[in-house]
Image: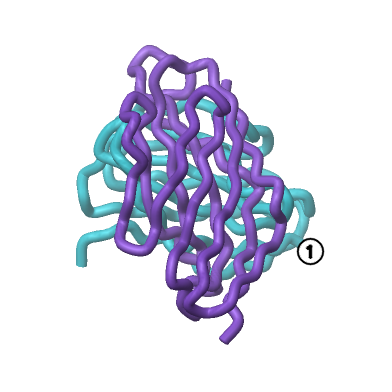
Chain colours: A cyan, B purple
Amino acid sequence: DAGITQSPRYKITETGRQVTLMCHQTWSHSYMFWYRQDLGHGLRLIYYSAAADITDKGEVPDGYVVSRSKTENFPLTLESATRSQTSVYFCASSDSGYQPQHFGDGTRLSIL
Amino acid sequence: AQTVTQSQPEMSVQEAETVTLSCTYDTSESDYYLFWYKQPPSRQMILVIRQEAYKQQNATENRFSVNFQKAAKSFSLKISDSQLGDAAMYFCASRGSNAGGTSYGKLTFGQGTILTVHP
């Protein structure tokens, strides 16, 4: 089915571990985004990508790494997880910079 | 740079009544879009309505409408004939629409308002 999918839906890990959140979209949208959602902050942009091999930092990029070798995939890696990175993570995509963004169902990540 | 502020952490409404959620924003962009997203307990982010800043006419989608006051940088959401299924967290967001702007393509969200609908 067409859409945007995130995996896993839930993840529990320990501090210091590396963890990768996956995002896959089937629309061939140019733009892809990663947000984190925390109580009292709404959603905040971590990284975004305007096309394959083009990525840029958002509001809260520290501690995260992204790559985009293929248009449809945009994985987010926490290289050494910290408790402050416990959050719900959303991936989104859009066809252009001004079209509405379509969101995945989110990944709830808990770091113990 | 963009900032979006939702000053109402929680709101409640009786079923079939009308409720208005408030949002104020600030932006350095000359052209931009404003959005309201709904997030039910399922965690999905659902686009409710969007407004293009250069349009003076307020956007409407069925029971949802906005009051866009550009000079005041205000963008409130009115939900008419509230239904139990409207209960959710609502987020206001802005996004620059100039390709050369720093906010182009990137959504900036408010803190959210939790809406409870009483039967």
Q: Secondary structure at mark 1?
A: loop
- Which is more toward the observer, B119 or A68? B119
Residue B37 lies, in percent from the top left, at: 46, 54
Judge from the rendering whether residue B31 lies leftward or rightward of residue A47; answer left or right: left
Q: Give, as a three-letter code, the residue at label 1.
A: Leu
Residue A20 lies, in percent from the top left, at: 53, 53
Judge from the rendering whether residue B21 lies leftward or rightward of residue B94; answer left or right: right
In the figure, residue B33 lies in which quadrant?
A: top left
- Which is more toward the observer, A40 or A14? A40
Location of the N terminus of chain B (image quadrant): top right
* Residue A81 to residue A54: above or below: below
Question: Residue at label 1?
Answer: A112
The reply to whether residue B15 is visible in this rendering is yes
The reply to whether residue A52 is visible in this rendering is no
Location of the C terminus of chain B (image quadrant): bottom right
Residue B7 lies, in percent from the top left, at: 70, 46
Total tally of numbered discs in the picture: 1
* Residue A77 to residue A39: above or below: above
Q: Residue furthest front?
A: B17
Q: Residue at x 77, y 55 (%)?
A: A15
* Residue B86 to residue A101: above or below: below
Chain under label 1? A
Q: Residue at x 33, y 18 (%)?
A: B99
Residue neighbourhood size for the residue with mark 1, other residues' Cα within 10 Å, grouped as few (<14), some (14–19), many (≥20): few
- Which is more toward the observer, A41 or B117? B117
Q: Residue at x 77, y 49 (%)?
A: A84
Residue A9 lies, in percent from the top left, at: 51, 68
- Which is more toward the observer, B116 or A19? B116
Q: Residue at x 27, y 33 (%)?
A: A96
Judge from the rendering whether residue B73 lies leftward or rightward of residue B12; answer left or right: left
